[in-house]
Every structure is written in structure tokens, then in C-alpha cells.
Amino acid sequence: LEVTKAPSSVNVPDVTFVFAESDTITVNTVNATDINAEVVDHSEANVVINKISDDEYVVTVSGLDAGSYTLSVTTVTDDNHASKTNTSTVTVTKATSSISLSDVEYYYLGSDTSKATTVNATGVTNAYVVEHPEANVVVNGYEVTVSGLDAGSYTLSVTTVTDNNHSPATATAEVVVKAIPTSIKFNEDLVIIGNTLTFNTVNITIGQSVTLKSNNRNYSGTVNNNVATIVIGDAESGTFSASVSYAGNNNYIASTDDSSIKFIAPDSFTALQ
């Protein structure tokens, strides 16, 4: 007469946890006195078994990199029962990284640096100004320098560099490029009709136009090396209030200055001499 061993059984749920964390599952058995558990081919895994009752166990798994693994659980039985092995899938997902950026602000033709603060990252990459490929963006460690933009408001985007256990994250910062202030140094002056009027300017670029308004007449000139030159062609002799203006543009702020001006006819100036 041959009496065979009765079977045992074990139910093993799947395991899912985030890298550097753990997960706990409940394993139920029939006709078993204990269980053994391991992550197949990964001895670095930490597997802890806590027996709750004769047929219930709590198994905690940790210590694995992000990826997919196999958990194997085998029943320990007495002489009258056959052991049973069952498996489940262990999924370790990537932990998140994070990034925050300081805003950027500078004057046109200048630059400024955004400093990145990260968690679970080894660096930053893929830094660019959204929808503005003309921007010059340079990454140096955790600092991102922006230049090459016209005056205006923009968005800087930067992404973390991570290892295999962390997912990348992206953050944005505001980029504000301010127009350059300009000024005109126009003081009370005397000019001979038919000659030129000159005065100093600040931050008005070469070739830009300036306008003199006096006695209901307009006179135009240009700037070269921070000096404006206007030819006074036709004018009425006398002293009048005057206003000189620069219209500005997107990158340079308009400016004006007011004073008085005395127009003298050439023959009157000769007589004065």
C-alpha cells in the first residue's frame, strides 16, 4: 500500500514599490508549517518574513533597483505534505527627482544666471528658452546662463539629469529682459541758422534718429558715438523753448530733454563778431 503526500499550496500576490522604499504582501498557505522566500537571482534583495498565523505570513521586499523581478515563495511542510513553490512579479518603479529654478532678469545685451536646486539628480540638461531658439543658453553645473534675447518676457525650461533609479523632472523660470534706459543732455544753446547743433546722448546707438522741436518746427538728426548732430536749415531768429527727443524701440527706452535755444541768422552772427 502506497500513501502519497497531500499537497500544500501558497498564494503570492504581486509586489510593487518605489525605489528606496518597500512593499508588504500577505501570503496565504494551506498544509504548510512555514515558508521560504527570495527574489530570484538577486541576492541583494532584502526579504523579511513575519508569520502571523499557521496559514498567513507577511512578506516585505526592499533593497532593489528600479526594474522587474520575480519573487519565489516555497512552503515548508511536514512529512505528510509536499512542498509547493509559487511566484509573483516584483515591480520597482523609479523614484521622482525634483527641480526648482531662480528667475532671470537682465538688461538687453547683458545676461543673467538661473540657479537650479534639485533633489535626486546628478545635474541639469535640456535647458532652453521656450519658442526662442535664438537665445544663448549655457549650462555650467547647476547654473544656467541666458543671453541673446530682445527685451521682453520669456520662459526658461530646464530638466534634471538622473540615474536609472530616478525619473527626470522639468521646471520653468521667468526670463525678463529689460530695455536699456537712454538719456539726452541738451542744454541752452546758440546755433547759427544753416549750421549744425550737437549735444551728448547716453545709450543711443549709432545711426539712431533724434528730433528737435522748437518754434513749431521739427529738425531731425542722427547719433554717432553718443553725440547727436542736427542740421538747422530754415529757422526764425530768436530764442525759443526747445525739446529734443529719441523715440526709442523695443530694446531702448525713449528719452527727452527740454531747454531753450537761440537761433541767429548768419549775417547777424557776423555783425556780432
Image: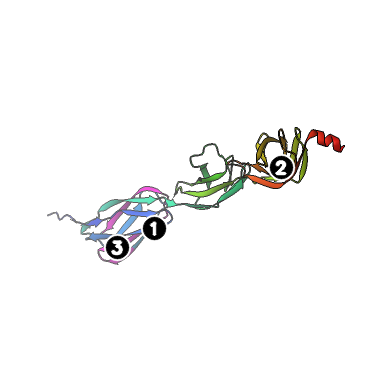
> What crowding class fits label 2: few (fewer than 14 Cα within 10 Å), some (14-19), or many (20 or more)?
many
Say whether disc 3 or disc 1 marks the residue closer to the N-terminus.
1
Select label 2 or label 3 by which is in front.
2
Image: 161 above or below 6: above
Q: Position of residue 273 (x, y in %)?
A: 87, 37
| Amino acid tagged 3 | Tyr
Q: Which residue is rendered at x = 43% and y = 52% of the image?
A: 95
Select label 3 or label 1 by which is in front.
1
User: What span is in magenta?
Assistant: 50-76
Q: Which mark is residue 57?
A: 3
Label 2 and label 3: CA atoms lie apart by 85 Å
Which secondary structure lies at badge 2?
A: strand
Say whether disc 2 or disc 1 marks the residue closer to the N-terminus.
1
Q: Is residue 266 visible?
A: yes
183 left or right of 272 in image: left
Q: Which mark is residue 22?
A: 1
